[in-house]
Image (tube, rainbow, N blue to C red):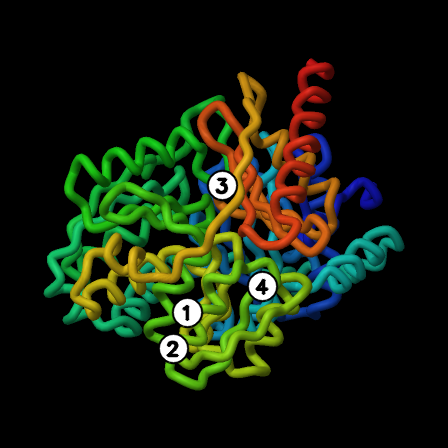
């Protein structure tokens, strides 16, 4: 049965109760527990999606059967999970969250004792062990325990407040509109903002509506609504978080979303001159221009998040940026953290004494090439998922994905009723955008034909 499991970007993906079934999760827990050893400690968490809860409990039973103690955070974000791993002396951490590329899917993230996500090779080794059935069960008297760490939100909140310049933020008179995307960030972020004196409005801060599909990223309609509310309410900024709070799309005070490059450009203002900063290879040229202006050395990393974060640790990089709205502040945690990113943007704006839109306008302008394909009533996630499986050199983003076409990178972004292709206006960019537009049209035709 383990041969049916799919690794995508080194993470387990699958439709709940079709591919990812409780029996397989219990088996995987037994394999992982055998590798970690009896009396090891593992921390687990999930989002608010019911299948995530079911599969987490199944995996926990497998861990217990090998003598592993499970510290269960119940509904908690990935940043909280990773932050707690080293502090609790855990040998691993496991997060269950809704898949970013398909309806009814679940994604499983595994982290080592340092908080670095497992490499693809390490995940493949676990699956090979499942095939061979190499599980060492404990004697009944040594079966592991499950405990609930109800204080995880408080520990993380206190750490964030002490990490940022809380007095400066409190004096800024800021107002945030945040779409929690039905995730557990709604359990922790409001209290942090309250401690920082930030007024907030939260959207989709409850559990997912019953018997309705949810997505890892906020939908195009949700992002449009957030932009309108930011403008109408006179908020300082908006933030659209993914289900486990590792990614964020920042909206400025004019209701305009920031690109990943603009987000990095603003946050580089707090990086010391001469520092080396790790970024994913698909980041655009705007970041290079900002880094030159501010005396920061960029190191582009090809490969997985594991490679990116491992290299960042070796370089001593104070921050890590990807093209997918992911930012990690390594002296705080090795987790990409959309909540902390949002607060650091507020901190940067307050210290600059400017509105976020003004800071954005001061960034270098990079010309782009665009093309649009009408989507109709097709599910944008099917388009994104199909493209992501088609191309090895592709990275998921908050609004879709970024794909390599020759020497160029093209962003494929889901908007209301359409898919938009965007590339920096460099040599060959126009042809790359048109080529990817043709691919998107072909994928949409296939989806229509399969209905």
Horizontal relation, residue 367 to residue 340: left or right: right
> Percent x, y for residue 321?
49, 64
Measure how far apart labels 4 and 3 are at the Cα level: 17 Å
Q: Is residue 143 above or below residue 406?
A: below
Separation of disc 4 and disc 2 at Cα? 19 Å
The answer for how far apart the CA atoms under marks 2 and 1 are is 6 Å
User: Counting residues from the N terminus, which is met first, the one under dot 4 or under dot 2?
Assistant: 4
In the orientation shown, which residue stands out farthest toward the bottom? 274
- Residue 294: mark: 2
Q: Residue at x 62, y 51 (%)?
A: 409
Q: Residue furthest right?
A: 132
Q: In which quarter of the view is residue 107 placed?
A: top right
Mark 1 and mark 3 lie on one chain; the one further toward the N terminus is 1
In this view, the mark in front (4 or 1): 1
Position of the C terminus by quadrant: top right
Can residue 139 be seen at all in this image of the molecule?
no
Q: CA distance from mark 3 to mark 2?
A: 29 Å
Q: Position of residue 2 (x, y in %)?
A: 81, 45
Q: Tell me residue 416's x, y (percent).
A: 45, 27
Marks 1 and 2: in contact by CB < 8 Å? yes
Q: Residues within 10 Å of mark 1 (few under 14, many from 20)?
A: many
- In the image, what residue occupies the spot 80% across and 61% down? 125
Q: Which mark is residue 30?
A: none
């Amino acid at each position: 049965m383990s041969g049916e499991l799919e690794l995508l970007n080194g993470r387990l993906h699958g439709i709940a109760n079709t591919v990812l079934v409780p029996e397989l999760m219990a088996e995987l827990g037994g394999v992982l527990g055998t590798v970690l050893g009896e009396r090891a400690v593992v921390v687990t968490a999930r989002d608010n999606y019911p299948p995530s809860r079911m599969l987490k409990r199944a995996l926990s039973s497998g861990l217990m059967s090998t003598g592993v103690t499970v510290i269960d955070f119940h509904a908690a974000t990935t940043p909280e999970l990773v932050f707690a791993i080293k502090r609790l002396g855990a040998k691993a951490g496991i997060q269950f969250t809704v898949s970013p590329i398909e309806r009814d899917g679940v994604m499983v993230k595994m982290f080592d004792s340092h908080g670095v996500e497992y490499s693809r090779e390490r995940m493949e080794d676990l699956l090979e062990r499942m095939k061979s059935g190499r599980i060492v069960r404990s004697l009944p008297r040594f079966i592991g325990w499950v405990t609930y760490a109800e204080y995880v939100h408080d520990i993380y909140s206190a750490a964030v407040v002490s990490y940022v310049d809380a007095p400066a933020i409190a004096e800024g008179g800021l107002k945030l509109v945040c779409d929690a995307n039905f995730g557990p960030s709604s359990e922790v972020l409001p209290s942090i903002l309250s401690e920082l004196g930030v007024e907030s409005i939260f959207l989709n801060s409850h559990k997912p509506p019953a018997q309705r599909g949810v997505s890892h990223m906020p939908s195009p309609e949700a992002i449009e609504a957030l932009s309108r509310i930011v403008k109408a309410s006179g908020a300082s900024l908006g933030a659209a978080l993914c289900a486990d709070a590792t990614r964020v799309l920042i909206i400025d005070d004019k209701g305009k979303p920031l690109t990943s490059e603009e987000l990095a450009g603003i946050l580089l203002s707090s990086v010391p001159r001469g520092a080396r900063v790790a970024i994913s290879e698909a980041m655009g040229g705007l970041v290079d221009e900002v880094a030159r202006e501010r005396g920061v050395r960029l190191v582009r990393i090809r490969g997985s998040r594991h490679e990116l974060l491992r290299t960042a640790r070796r370089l001593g990089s104070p921050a890590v940026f990807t093209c997918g709205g992911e930012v990690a502040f390594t002296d705080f945690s090795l987790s990409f953290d959309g909540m902390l990113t949002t607060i650091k943007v507020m901190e940067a704006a307050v210290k600059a004494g400017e509105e976020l839109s003004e800071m954005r306008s001061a960034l270098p302008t990079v010309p782009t090439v665009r093309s649009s394909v009408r989507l109709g009533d097709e599910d944008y996630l099917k388009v994104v998922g199909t493209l992501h499986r088609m191309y090895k050199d592709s990275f998921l983003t908050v609004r879709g994905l970024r794909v390599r076409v020759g020497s160029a990178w093209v962003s494929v972004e889901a908007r209301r009723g359409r898919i938009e292709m965007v590339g920096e206006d460099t040599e060959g960019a126009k042809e790359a955008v048109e080529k990817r537009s043709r691919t998107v049209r072909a994928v949409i035709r296939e989806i229509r034909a399969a209905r």
